[in-house]
Structure formats: structure tokens, C-alpha cells
Amino acid sequence: MGLEIPFYGIGQINIGKGKGFDGVGPYVGLGLSLKCQSGDVNFYKKNELTDFPSMNRCDFDGGVICGYEYNKLLTSFI
């Protein structure tokens, strides 16, 4: 289970009877919990095979969003 927090800069333009929008920006992802059915394994700690964890608790990346708002109905494509 994790959480992603985006920081988008969004612009709008009137198109027909609605508005089109698009945006771009970074996001921060945080790993909150990870469970394994095969036992008590913590993927966020160093494992025996390598000197680094299997998964990172924190993630940084970028994203794009675009969509169209028509008659108060919002349709977005991420």
C-alpha cells in the first residue's frame, strides 16, 4: 500500500461548450505498508543477497494529466 502526491501545473482553454486542460509536474510516492503471504519479510530493509533493500519507501517521478470538462462533467486521462 502506498500514497502518491502529485504537484501538477495545469492550464485550461475553452473548446466548444467545455474546457480542455492539461498539466505536467512531479510527484512524490511513499510506501506505507507491504505484506507478504509467505511470512514475516520486510522488503524495505537490506536483504541477505544484496546490500540494499528490495524496494524503496520513497519515490520521485514526473507525470502528465490531460482531460476535458463538458457541462460540469469532468473526464480526465492520466
Image: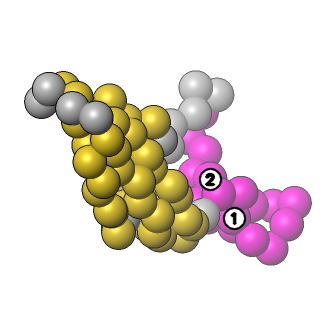
Secondary element at image label 2:
loop
Residue 78: x and y, percent? 47, 41
Question: For mark 2, does the 10 Å Cα neighbourhood hold few (<14), some (14 to 19), or many (20 or more) residues?
Answer: some
Is 75 on the left or on the right of 38, as rendered? left
Q: Quadrant of the N terminus?
A: top left
Front-most of 7 and 31? 7
Front-most of 77 and 6? 77
Residue 74: x and y, percent? 24, 31
Q: Which mark is residue 53?
A: 1
Of label 2 and label 1, which has the lower sequence position?
2
Judging by the rendered image, the residue that carries numbered circle 2 is 43
Front-most of 2 and 47? 2
Residue 40: x and y, percent? 56, 41
* Magenta segment includes 41: yes
Question: For mark 1, does the 10 Å Cα neighbourhood hold few (<14), some (14 to 19), or many (20 or more) residues?
Answer: some
Residue 32: x and y, percent? 39, 53
The amino acid beneath tag 1 is Pro
Magenta stretch: give its range.
Answer: 39-55
